[in-house]
Image: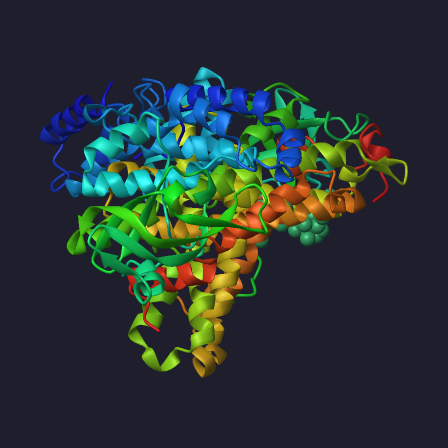
């Protein structure tokens, strides 16, 4: 398995970056956070359907692009670098679930970018064996024939979804998003919105039965953890390069602040951490793409390593910019908020370390 | 040249050279002459001009056949630093003379760079080389010279023109360690033994034919050595849990009585860092194999030093009472760093050198900040001053 980027991946990166530079500069992203449309639906359509990012992990015979999760991870890097307000993570997790249960019709729509499906689980759901949502949804969720009743909190990207996947007691169900009640939550991260979702006798279509829910959830969660690591890499890269550029130009004491060794060393250390994060994220993406038996380790390793690196990069970005970074009108806070939320999303680093311990036979 | 073809070549070679019956040295020499030593080197110099990424194919094939290796640890300085410098800057004659016995391990190499007054600021070195007849006479003192007690040859940098600023008046030589003017004295380390030495050079004669690169170009030539040194330290592909972390993880697994909840998370932090470092080294290896410049080498060495220090410190505390004991402070002159066989205390002490040898971590951070990130250079008061006028 290679840990380097292929030429095709670099081309894809270039295309995504050009689009984001054009359509989602940070000034626009910031403005959108306080608008009525926190998700950029038009941008998402271009990205998903025209550039074809929704189809990347889907095999050609199912209407996909015949690329792989490796390419999908490169897209996640770029979206992280731009803190782009698109439902990429939620949609990718749903795609992974669909691939696992082989629902070809929906998969075709989703990979064409015609419809956006999102898994209705709390974003903070960490590593664990059982589909975690049943625990939360189970008690007050009833399946009456083909309707569903229940509630789930802190669902990322639900506001941008056409279809929601709900894990109920005995299966995985698809629900029209418009039929559910989606209450926007004021989320710490303004560029990936959360919603509390409830269902009151909402018509539901059963996608998979009891036995298939576990594998579908596991596939979705792992794909999410792997892509999130690439997103975290992108965030960290943006924070590092932006800070480096800033300290080169900001003068105090008659010289660029970047000439002070204390800052040079902090940035050098951060560069080392980001360099490591790149290798770790690439390894995870490779394992996901290849269906490598080491995937469970790679995914938790990636989350245990890349999450803290992104947070540190964003925190250093704020500190080394000084007062300007505490202002609403500077982009640093968008990255800090995304990085910190990402560190909780799909389980904190500590939870991933505990999971890893079990996977690599380090008993408690 | 692809992997299949290489494998076939090795097998053909093994058909004619049975490692079970052949003399070890003869075998290694024949392997070199067949171009199967370091395959990325040019033909006639132990290689085939093949991609470096295919080297493991060859090494694995030889290992599987039970062939002897060249004891790479003992000749690490030769393989990792002297050889690439000779290849890049040496004449054909020099390459032919030195590379073969270097690779077979017949001739061990050491590195006469650091001096008591010139460590991080290596370019400030004061060892003098004065032109005499058809050669040079060298006087001065070097220090921290690993393996000087074993070495047949040394790569040496010395000052040939003190009237120029420090980077300009340096020339790069190959020094014969058997010259009567070379005196090697062991320096005992915090671990008890003496891996390294101080080396006194008194009227040492070096023929001009043993100069690498032009007169006054020594600093530039030395960059090749130093770049390769950073890549050599901490680089290379290792399996998961192949380093210090494997030792501690196994202690943890086999000794339940040592475990505590707080230490479990501490151990897992180290495990994650070790794996991140390992994958970074693997990625660096791929980059080098495809000929991309590897600034990642600095990241690898920087992280490796910190990690080893953290793991070995953790290991001592995990062991508690046993951590109070040491295995052997006897003064010896080893040829390697047998960290697997030695005690946790040795690992802890020896790892302290990881952030000093081959350029300190602080210097590495300066290099990363300036050359990778493009931050302003340190203020240099000495750059344009003739070396002889520098305060010392
Ligand atoms: C185990 C071991 C083996 C070695 N083997 C060899 C060998 O075989 N051949 C050889 O030639 N050398 C060898 N060395 C020497 C090694 O390269 C030097 O020790 C090293 O370069 C540091 O030099 P110094 O010891 O003089 O420390 P100094 O340069 O005096 O450094 C003292 C402290 O100041 C810091 N410092 C110095 N300059 C700066 C700066 N500009 N900015 C910030 N901090 C700074 C350093 O990081 C360090 O913390 C070996 C060293 C060790 C420990």
Q: Is residue A244 left or right of residue A278?
A: right
In percent of width and height, residue A280 lies at 42, 44
Residue A349 showing in the rendered view: yes
Give the mark count.
0
Q: How is the image coloured?
A: rainbow
In percent of width and height, residue A37 lies at 56, 35
Please tell me which residue lies in front, B193 or A176: A176
In which quarter of the view is residue B236 placed?
A: top left
Q: Residue at x 38, y 20 (%)?
A: A8
Q: Which quadrant holds the N terminus of chain B? A: top left
Residue furthest to the right: A254
Residue furthest to the left: B15
In percent of width and height, residue B90 lies at 50, 21
Q: Is residue A331 left or right of residue A237?
A: right
Please tell me which residue lies in front, A251 or A106: A106
Residue A189 versus residue A136 in the image, above or below? above
Please tell me which residue lies in front, A229 or B163: A229
In percent of width and height, residue A64 lies at 27, 25
Q: Is residue B343 left or right of residue A29?
A: left
Please tell me which residue lies in front, B105 or A127: A127
Residue B118 showing in the rendered view: no
In which quarter of the view is residue B282 placed?
A: top left
In which quarter of the view is residue B111 placed?
A: top right
Q: Which quadrant holds the C terminus of chain B? A: top right
């Amino acid at each position: 398995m290679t840990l380097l980027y292929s030429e095709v991946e670099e081309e894809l990166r270039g295309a995504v970056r050009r689009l984001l530079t054009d359509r989602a500069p940070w000034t626009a992203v910031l403005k959108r956070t306080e608008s009525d449309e926190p998700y950029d639906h038009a941008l998402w359509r271009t990205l998903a359907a025209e550039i074809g990012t929704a189809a990347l992990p889907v095999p050609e015979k199912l209407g996909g692009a015949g690329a792989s999760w490796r390419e999908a991870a490169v897209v996640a890097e770029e979206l992280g670098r731009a803190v782009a307000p698109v439902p990429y993570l939620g949609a990718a997790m749903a795609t992974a679930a669909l691939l696992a249960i082989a629902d070809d019709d929906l998969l075709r729509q989703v990979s064409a970018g015609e419809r956006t499906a999102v898994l209705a689980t709390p974003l903070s759901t960490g590593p664990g064996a059982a589909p975690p949502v049943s625990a939360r949804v189970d008690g007050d969720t009833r399946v009456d024939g083909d309707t569903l009743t229940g509630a789930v909190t802190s669902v990322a990207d639900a506001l941008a979804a056409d279809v929601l996947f709900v894990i109920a007691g005995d299966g995985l169900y698809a629900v029209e998003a418009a039929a559910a009640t989606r209450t926007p939550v004021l989320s710490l991260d303004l560029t990936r919105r959360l919603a509390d979702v409830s269902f009151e006798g909402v018509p539901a279509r059963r996608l998979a039965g009891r036995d298939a829910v576990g594998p579908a959830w596991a596939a979705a969660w792992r794909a999410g953890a792997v892509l999130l690591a690439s997103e975290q890499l992108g965030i960290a890269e943006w924070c590092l390069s932006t800070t480096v550029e800033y300290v080169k130009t900001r003068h105090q004491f008659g010289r660029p602040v970047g000439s002070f060794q204390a800052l040079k060393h902090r940035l050098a250390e951060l560069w080392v951490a980001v360099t490591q994060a790149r290798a770790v994220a690439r390894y995870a993406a490779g394992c996901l793409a290849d269906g490598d038996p080491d995937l469970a380790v790679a995914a938790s390793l990636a989350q245990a390593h890349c999450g803290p690196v992104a947070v540190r990069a964003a925190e250093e970005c704020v500190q080394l910019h000084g007062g300007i970074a505490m202002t609403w009108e500077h982009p640093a806070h968008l990255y800090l908020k995304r990085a910190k939320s990402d560190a909780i999303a799909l389980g904190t680093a500590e939870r991933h370390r505990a999971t890893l311990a079990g996977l690599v036979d380090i008993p408690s | 040249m692809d992997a299949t073809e290489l494998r076939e070549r090795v097998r053909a070679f093994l058909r004619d050279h049975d490692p079970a019956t052949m003399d070890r040295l003869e075998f290694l020499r024949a392997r070199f002459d067949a171009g199967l030593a370091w395959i990325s080197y040019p033909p006639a110099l132990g290689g085939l001009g093949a991609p470096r990424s295919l080297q493991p194919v060859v090494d694995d094939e030889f290992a599987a056949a039970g062939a002897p290796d060249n004891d790479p640890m003992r000749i690490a300085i030769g393989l990792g630093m002297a050889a690439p410098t000779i290849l890049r800057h040496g004449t054909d004659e020099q390459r032919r003379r030195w590379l073969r016995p270097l690779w077979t391990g017949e001739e061990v190499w050491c590195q006469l760079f650091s001096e008591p007054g010139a460590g991080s600021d290596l370019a400030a070195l004061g060892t003098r080389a004065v032109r005499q007849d058809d050669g040079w006479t060298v006087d001065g003192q070097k220090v921290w010279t690993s393996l000087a007690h074993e070495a047949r040859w040394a790569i040496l940098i010395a000052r040939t023109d003190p009237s120029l600023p420090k980077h300009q008046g340096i020339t790069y030589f190959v020094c014969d360690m058997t010259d009567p003017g070379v005196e090697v004295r062991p320096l005992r380390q915090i671990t008890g033994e003496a891996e390294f030495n101080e080396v006194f050079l008194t009227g040492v004669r070096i023929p001009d034919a043993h100069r690498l690169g032009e007169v006054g170009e020594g600093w530039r030539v030395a960059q090749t050595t130093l770049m390769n040194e950073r890549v050599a330290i901490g680089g290379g592909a290792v399996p998961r849990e192949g380093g210090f972390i494997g030792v501690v993880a196994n202690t943890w697994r086999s000794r339940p009585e040592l475990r505590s909840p707080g230490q479990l998370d501490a151990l897992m932090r180290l495990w994650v860092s070790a794996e991140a470092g390992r994958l970074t080294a693997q990625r660096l290896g791929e980059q080098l194999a495809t000929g991309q410049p590897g600034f990642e080498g600095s990241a690898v060495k920087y992280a490796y030093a910190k990690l080893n220090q953290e793991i070995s410190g953790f290991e001592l505390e995990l062991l508690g009472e046993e951590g109070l004991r040491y295995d052997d402070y006897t003064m010896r002159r080893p040829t390697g760093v047998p960290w697997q066989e030695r005690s946790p205390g040795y690992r802890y002490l020896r790892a302290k050198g990881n952030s000093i040898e081959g350029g300190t971590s602080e210097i590495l951070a300066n290099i990363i900040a300036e050359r990778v990130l493009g931050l302003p250079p340190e203020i240099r008061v000495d750059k344009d001053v003739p070396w002889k006028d520098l305060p010392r």
